[in-house]
Image (cartoon, grey):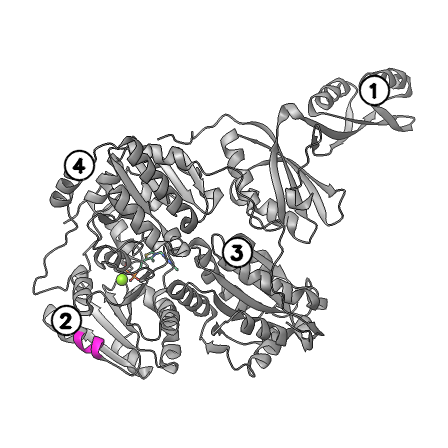
Amino acid sequence: MEHDDKLPTSSSHTVSLLVENKPGVLHRIAGLFSRRGYNIASLTVGPTERPEYSRMTIVVRLSSKTVEQVVRQVQKLVPVVEVRELSPVDLVERELLLVKIRTPEKNHAELRALAETYEAKIVDVSPDALVIEASGNAGKLDALEDRLAQYGIQELCRSGRIALERGFKTLAPPNLK
Amino acid sequence: MAKEKTTGAKAVVKALEAEGVEWVFGVPGGAILPIYDALFDSRTVKHVLVRHEQTGAHAAEGFAHATGKVGVCFGTSGPGATNLVTGIADAYMDSVPMVAITGNVSSSLIGSDAFQEADITGITMPITKHNWLVTDVKDLPRILKEAFYIARTGRPGPVLVDIPKDIQNAEFEFEYPDSVNIPGYHPPVREEPRLKDAAALIRASSRPVIYLGGGVRTSGAYDEVAQFVELVGAPVVTTVHGKGALPESHPQCLGMFGMHGAKFTNYTVQDADLIIALGARFDDRVTGKLSTFAPEAKIVHLDVDPAEISKLVTATVPLVGDLKLLLPQLTEQTRKAFAASGRADIAPWWIKVSAWREKHPLHHAPQGDQFIEPQHVIERIWEKTQGKALVTTGVGKHQMFAAQYWKTIWPRQFITSGGLGTMGFCLPAAIGVQLGKPDALVIGIDGDGSFQMTLQDLATAVDLKLNIKIFILNNLFLGMVHQWQDLFYEKRLSETPLSDLPDLVKLAEAYSCLGLRARKPSELEDVLDRALAHKGGPVIVDIRTRPDAHVYPMVPAGAPLNDMIDGE
Ligand SMILES: Cc1ncc(C[n+]2csc(CCOP(=O)(O)OP(=O)(O)O)c2C)c(N)n1
Ligand SMILES: [Mg+2]
């Protein structure tokens, strides 16, 4: 018989959920994660193409086996219509980053150039500060953050991940298609 | 059903009627008054006024356990609702179908810390299959329909519907739906069940074991299990909720395994090369230390709840589905596999198992003339009733003695709090069981500690003139904790001795029912006979048992399953 390793090798997994858009759903899902000891790296929730459903994207750092267990437990929640782990090679993922840099005006040009390399935008300018907006996958935003660090990051916030599978596949189960 | 103008409260009662509910257990209060007022007019739904909502929830569980139907309980807002929590949690752990209905303060007051307001949907979220706070009376019929449906289908469990008072009073056009449509429920099973793979494992196994859990009871797959067991010919072991899934007198049945399983039963499980788990969940009370559990066994795991598959023990072949539908298919596949390519010889396995059975049976201290041995009491009650009684228990040593020595004949005969281990379960459950099975002999095997947690509902049993017989194995201890202190805490008996209170015979009399006592072995037979013969209401029997009679064998928590302490 095989056994669960006590210290599984964990990696980042993207779990996508289609849930009924009703009060308390976020509470049910967050509660399930916390009581079963599944740590959430990030969670986003927002509307979908159908007003009665919301889409949640949850990033967890767990072993693949535990993620399977997460999916099965989440599927049991009544307002969860569908849940699946998205294959990392087969998905389009985005996060959004906003960074405020406190820096004298003389550096602005340099920052503008840097932002351009990362397809980022300067969305607010004042004499001694800039706000930069960037979107992309986690790796790209991490790299941008690193580059900006030397200018002095005053404030930073990053959204959780949102993701869709490539191709024509959708998350909705057959009875909803 | 035709539409008719009615109130939310009346709609609740109409829904209960439509669901065929016979008994509801509860206590009224301000926030649920409209529903109680509506109940006053019902001709089919009868209400049992319990003295504590926890009892109401356990009685609903007892009723559901005994009948397989949904148990229903009521509570008012705030403390009424929170008193239900233990019973709801118990039902959740043991997959008991239950609908709990609570009143709440009016919608406009919710969130304002109003008098007797509690966020009971928030509180019960982790211990219900689902719950609802009703915000629009028009949703009420659909929600109630869904509530009953979810409680009883799939892996059954408790649900809670919280109804603010203004919603109970609101008027609307009532129509009870015929069917439910819940997009997120009943997820389609994705994989085809790998029946051929399972059958191949069974065919090749020379040391198979069949492991039956509470899922057999919830699916009602007794005949299907019996046919499978006969075909495979393997030793059968059960959990405490699997007791009765196959009569324990069946020659292949080795009884309960786990922390207090017989040695020969645990040895058999540990040495298996294949474990076929049917409606069971590899709880830590049965596996012992997980990493040493049945080291050579492959696992075929059949369960209706996909989340149980490979949760603790990785299934070699998972089979997700209802036992009643899937097991006959597995039997058929196995029959084909046997016919096509023969099977491994399991005769040597049986020789080994039988030798263990002979050498390491369950045993206890012989009944002397000084102390009454608790195990002996169970054996005597069994013999006197020929095992033809429905049994409920409290939680502790008496519960495990009952599990070991009450040889269960029928399904749904042995009713206990397994998953949550709730002291106080015995008497309330016995009330629900007797109402569900009015003609059955209902016996409680209780502990002195457990009994005192819900004894106030003796009044309810007397009100209803229930002939339940509660045998209290009175060791003047919180005995199971005492046992752990004796074994693992250097006999430091911190807070486990119980004073000899109350006088249980006088207590029974105070409740206008029969109280009996046996202090010495010489008094036992007569007291048991009188209790069993008594008609006209409950009997409380105070049986003084040897305080240091502990439950053996015992697998210490965290030890391997075959590493058992054998005390006597
Ligand atoms: C509500 C609750 N509180 C505490 C416990 C912990 N506990 C488990 S067994 C036990 C002692 C039970 O005593 P008694 O009912 O007299 O049974 P005995 O073990 O003596 O047969 C206790 C306190 C529990 N299971 N349930
Ligand atoms: Mg005791």
Q: Residues within 10 Å of mark 1 (few under 14, many from 20)?
A: some
Ligand 1 falls in which quarter?
bottom left
- Residue type at mark 2 is Leu
Residue at point 53% right, 27% down? A10
Nearer to us in this view, B456 or A177: A177
Alpha carbons under labels 2 and 1: distance apart:
89 Å
Classified by dominant secondary structure, the portion drawn in magenta counts as: helix
Q: Which mark is residue B128?
A: 3
Which callout, 4 or 2, points at the residue further toward the start of the chain?
4
- Residue type at mark 3 is Thr
Of circles 4 and 3, the one toward us is 4
Of circles 2 and 3, the one toward us is 3
Alpha carbons under labels 4 and 2: distance apart:
44 Å
Q: Read off the residue under disc 2.
A: B524
Q: Chain of mark 1?
A: A
**Picture quarter containing residue B165?**
bottom right
Q: Residue furthest front?
A: B340
Q: Residues within 10 Å of mark 4 (few under 14, many from 20)?
A: few
Is B260 located above or below residue B434 in the figure?
above
Q: Chain of mark 4?
A: B
Residue at point 50% right, 79% down? B44
- Residue type at mark 4 is Ala
Q: Read off the residue under disc 1.
A: A115
